[in-house]
């Protein structure tokens, strides 16, 4: 698998649209808006893509997300999607919100849940790495509108092995992978955020667009993660320079052979 596949994997792990900004020689966290993380009560910038209570449907009316997916290597639509919405505490998804819906004529799958849903999605497709998609903010109309702006990229199975080969790392097939994307209070991608995982695993990030292991600080695109993560529930904490308290503390489910993904938002900006 060509190196370009790994590099594209870095930029496509998360489904949220983000503002990408170059760092040059400035400090890693320069220019980021951390006012809400500092406890000043700043609200998220309108239109940033963070969750909002405005314009929500009436109580009892569900929210729907018409999810579509593409192969991140070829950008071709991925068909035969199987998607289940799962309650966060239901780690085996034994009681999903409903049966997996059939894709429509455009290949989209409509997922419905009540406002405030904060579970996860199981996403499977032939030839793709199965993905657990988590939400650090509860479902809202604004969040789902942001998610629908572009298809969800799914990682072909050979590309995951290419990531391990490029980083000269033996991937454990009994483990899982985390892909974490940090945002600041304005909803912009946040480089320079340090991640801590509450279990043993190998951190990775992308330096000059190349995957590098044992790097635990988010890249220019706000991306970092962990490989060889033991299955189970793990806790991820994110830290910003100059702030002794975590920007966020989130729990995610990890499964063997699955990719678990989440966007990390400052707690006060949700």
Image (tube, grey):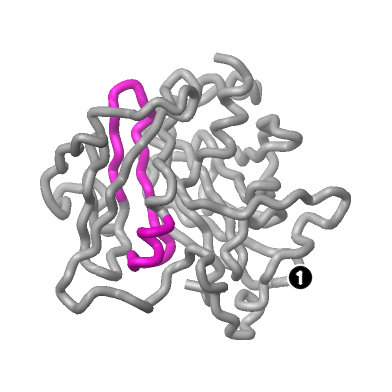
Q: Is residue 123 magenta?
A: yes
Residue that extends furthest to the front in the rendered view of this protein: 105
The x and y percentages for residue 62 are 19, 66
Q: Is residue 257 magenta?
A: no
Name which residue lies at 33% across and 76% down.
55
In the image, residue 244 sits, relative to residue 71, either above or below, namely below
Depth order, front residue of 9/205: 9
Residue that extends furthest to the bottom in the rendered view of this protein: 40
Q: Is residue 260 visible?
A: yes
Depth order, front residue of 159/188: 188
Residue carrying label 1: 242
The x and y percentages for residue 65 are 28, 54
The x and y percentages for residue 196 are 60, 54
State the extent of the magenta-drawn residues as a range. Answer: 121-146
Q: Is residue 233 visible?
A: no
* Residue 119 lies in quadrant: bottom left
Residue that extends furthest to the left in the rendered view of this protein: 99
Name which residue lies at 11% across and 45% down.
99
150 relative to 183 in the view: left or right? left
């Amino acid at each position: 698998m060509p190196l370009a596949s790994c590099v594209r994997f870095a930029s496509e792990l998360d489904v949220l649209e983000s503002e990408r900004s170059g760092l040059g020689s400035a400090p890693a966290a320069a220019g980021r808006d951390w006012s809400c993380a500092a406890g000043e009560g700043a609200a998220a910038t309108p239109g940033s893509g963070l969750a909002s209570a405005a314009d929500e449907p009436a109580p009892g009316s569900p929210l729907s997300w018409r999810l579509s997916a593409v192969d991140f290597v070829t950008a071709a639509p991925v068909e035969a999607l199987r998607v289940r919405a799962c309650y966060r505490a239901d780690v085996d998804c034994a009681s999903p919100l409903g049966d997996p819906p059939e894709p429509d004529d455009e290949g989209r799958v409509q997922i419905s849940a009540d406002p405030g849903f904060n579970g996860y999605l199981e996403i499977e497709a032939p030839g793709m790495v199965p993905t657990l998609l988590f939400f650090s903010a509860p479902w809202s109309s604004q969040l789902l509108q942001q998610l629908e702006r572009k298809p969800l990229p799914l990682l072909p199975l050979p590309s995951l092995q290419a990531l391990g080969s490029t980083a000269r790392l033996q991937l454990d097939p009994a483990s899982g992978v985390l892909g974490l994307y940090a945002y600041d209070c304005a909803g912009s991608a946040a480089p320079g955020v340090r991640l801590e995982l509450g279990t043993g695993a190998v951190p990775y990030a992308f330096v000059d667009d190349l995957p590098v292991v044992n790097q635990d600080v988010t890249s220019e695109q706000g991306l970092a993660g962990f490989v060889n993560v033991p299955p189970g529930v793990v806790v991820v904490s994110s830290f910003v320079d100059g702030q002794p308290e975590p920007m966020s503390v989130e729990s995610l489910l990890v499964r063997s052979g699955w990719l678990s993904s989440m966007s990390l938002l400052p707690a006060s900006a949700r």
